[in-house]
């Protein structure tokens, strides 16, 4: 299964970066792919492929997102693989940025994504052949990114969702993957929302340093096709559970270091890594 050439696949955030790379790989493997973006124009290039079906889905709109998924599922005759990949960063001081901004991010990336996952899981459980549910979290689940509190909460929450669903799906034909990419060379940082500068110059300098470090890391990171390959291989072998993807330093050495050294030391090293004061 999912490697089977006609398995229908549903991917949120297919217009760019990792989602677009997964969509292209799935198409190359012969799958029918339903991929989403907030505007159809963003999917124009993928839509040139006859087995790609563009879906307009905005995670800020809980009801609309759910009905976009349901309509696609009916059109596809059910999905064998669903990948909740869409997401964005917001950089700012938690105390100073209006809570409405954090609420919007948590609603989109955690609450409304979990609502999608619920509908998707129910559908996958009804399929005789089972299927695969992927929630794209991040290494930020383990290594929170500075001044990206909403993002860190959302990603840790998605990992908790996947881990919880592993319990509930263990005797079913559904595999759940908690996918945790490290840095990949996408437009993620360029799309980052930066709502305000801090009133505190030192905190502003910290945010600048964090953004610059992330930008430098993303520019030096592997291409998103690598994340797509790692995930697709895991889907094909029906992997269940957490899967890290990225370079050796981020996916092997850093988690090992974090496990072996005292928490306070690991935290200090992380802060240094991002150039914080
Ligand atoms: N790149 C990395 O280093 C990295 C590392 C760890 C985790 N991740 C995670 O991987 C996923 C993909 O990231 P990426 O690097 O590929 O980012 P990207 O290039 O910026 O692509 C983001 C995708 O998400 C969609 N999206 C953003 N906000 C949305 C919303 N409110 N509603 C619906 N769709 C929305 C975008 O669609 P539109 O066309 O509508 O903008 C786009 O297709 C994200 O969840 C991200 O957190 C990325």
Image: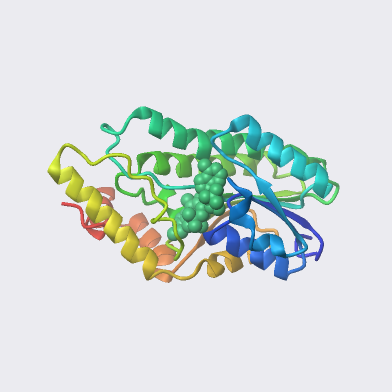
Q: Position of residue 167 (x, y in %)?
A: 64, 41
Q: Total marks drawn?
A: 0
Q: Position of residue 142 (x, y in %)?
A: 41, 50
The structure residue drawn at horizontal position 29% and vertical position 54%, both measured from the top left corner, is 211
Q: Nearer the viewer, residue 263 or 40?
A: 40
Quarter placement of the N terminus: bottom right
Whether residue 218 is situated above or below residue 173 in the rendered picture: below
Q: Position of residue 129 (x, y in %)?
A: 83, 51
Q: Horizontal placement of 91 versus 225: left or right?
A: left
Question: Do we see residue 181 in this rendering?
Answer: no
Residue 90: quarter of image: top left
Whether residue 204 is situated above or below residue 46 in the rendered picture: above
The structure residue drawn at horizontal position 15% and vertical position 39%, both measured from the top left corner, is 200
Residue 225: quarter of image: bottom right
Residue 16: quarter of image: bottom right
Q: Position of residue 156 (x, y in %)?
A: 46, 43
Name the residue furthest left. 201
Q: Horizontal placement of 231 versus 206: left or right?
A: right
The structure residue drawn at horizontal position 38% and vertical position 68%, both measured from the top left corner, is 219
Q: Horizontal placement of 175 versus 86: left or right?
A: right
Q: Horizontal placement of 187 versus 27: left or right?
A: left
Name the residue furthest front. 41
Question: Do we see residue 99 in this rendering?
Answer: yes
Q: Nearer the viewer, residue 137 or 90?
A: 90
Color theme of the render: rainbow
Q: Nearer the viewer, residue 171 or 154?
A: 154
């Amino acid at each position: 299964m999912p490697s089977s050439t006609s398995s229908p696949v549903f991917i949120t955030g297919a217009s760019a970066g990792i989602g677009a790379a997964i969509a292209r790989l799935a198409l190359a493997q012969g799958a029918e792919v339903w991929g989403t973006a907030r505007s159809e124009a963003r999917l124009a290039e993928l839509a040139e492929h006859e087995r790609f079906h563009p879906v307009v889905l905005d995670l800020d709109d809980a009801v609309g997102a759910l009905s976009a998924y349901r309509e696609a599922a009916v059109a596809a005759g059910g999905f064998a693989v669903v990948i909740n990949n869409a997401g964005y960063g917001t950089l700012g001081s938690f105390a100073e940025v209006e809570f409405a901004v954090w609420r919007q991010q948590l609603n989109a990336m955690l609450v409304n994504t979990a609502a999608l996952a619920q509908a998707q899981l129910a559908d996958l459980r009804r399929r005789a052949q089972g299927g695969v549910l992927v929630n794209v979290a991040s290494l930020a689940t383990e290594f929170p990114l500075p001044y990206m509190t909403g993002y860190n909460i959302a990603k840790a929450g998605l990992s908790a969702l996947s881990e919880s669903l592993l319990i509930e799906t263990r005797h079913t034909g559904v595999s759940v993957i908690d996918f945790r990419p490290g840095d990949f060379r996408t437009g993620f940082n360029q799309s980052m929302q930066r709502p305000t500068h801090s009133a505190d110059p030192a905190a502003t300098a910290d945010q600048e340093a964090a953004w610059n470090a992330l930008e430098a890391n993303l520019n030096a990171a592997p291409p998103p096709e690598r994340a797509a390959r790692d995930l697709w291989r895991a889907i094909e072998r029906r992997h269940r559970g957490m899967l890290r993807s990225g370079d050796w330093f981020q996916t092997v050495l850093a988690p090992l270091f974090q496990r072996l050294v005292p928490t306070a030391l690991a935290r200090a090293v992380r802060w240094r890594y991002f150039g914080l004061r």
